[in-house]
Image (tube, rainbow, N blue to C red):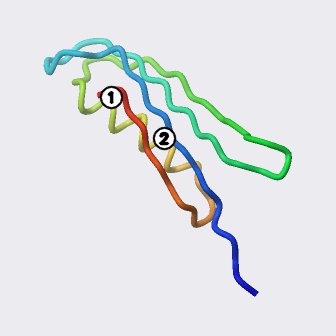
């Protein structure tokens, strides 16, 4: 019997557009397809003294840390 791999999408969006450190927000959203339709979970966080790349990576880290099983993963970012 073939094991089915879950398909998971991670969407990342930040308001930080400058390389210098400042206050920034990120939104991470996970979408997983289920038998009942798509299921989502999201995080919205504010961070201080952080660069554009740092805030993007933190949003991705939080989303990836919530995954518990192997999956086929697609990542979409606004940067």
Give the residue drawn at x 38%, y 36%.
58
Q: Nearer the viewer, residue 42 or 10?
A: 10
Q: Residue furthest bottom?
A: 1
Give the residue drawn at x 29%, y 28%.
79
Q: Residue furthest left?
A: 20
SS of the residue at dot 1?
helix
Q: Nearer the viewer, residue 11 or 69?
A: 11
Task: Determine whether, in the image, residue 41 is placed left or right of residue 45.
Answer: right
Q: CA distance from mark 2 to mark 1?
A: 11 Å
- Picture coordinates of residue 9 (x, y %)? 54, 45
Quadrant into which the N terminus falls: bottom right
Toward which corner of the image does residue 55 lie, by quadrant? top left
Is the residue 25 above or below the residue 55 in the image?
Answer: above
Give the residue drawn at x 62%, y 64%.
69
Is the residue 79 above or below the residue 69 in the image?
Answer: above
User: Tag 2: Cα neighbours inside 10 Å, few (<14), some, or many (≥20)?
Assistant: some
How many labels sit on residues?
2
SS of the residue at dot 2?
helix
Q: Which mark is residue 55?
A: 1
- Picture coordinates of residue 65 (x, y %)? 52, 50
Q: Earlier in the sequence, mark 2 or mark 1?
A: 1
- Picture coordinates of residue 48 (x, y %)? 32, 17
Is the residue 4 above or below the residue 44 in the image?
Answer: below
Q: Residue furthest right?
A: 36
Is the residue 25 above or below the residue 58 in the image?
Answer: above
Task: Determine whether, in the image, residue 63 is placed left or right of residue 41.
Answer: left
Task: Determine whether, in the image, residue 49 is placed left or right of residue 9.
Answer: left
């Amino acid at each position: 019997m073939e094991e089915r791999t879950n398909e998971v999408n991670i969407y990342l969006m930040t308001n930080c557009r400058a390389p210098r450190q400042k206050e920034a927000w990120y939104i991470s959203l996970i979408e997983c397809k289920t038998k009942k339709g798509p299921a989502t979970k999201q995080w919205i966080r504010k961070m201080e003294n952080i660069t554009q790349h740092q805030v993007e990576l933190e949003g991705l880290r939080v989303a990836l840390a919530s995954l518990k099983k192997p999956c086929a993963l697609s990542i979409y970012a606004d940067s």
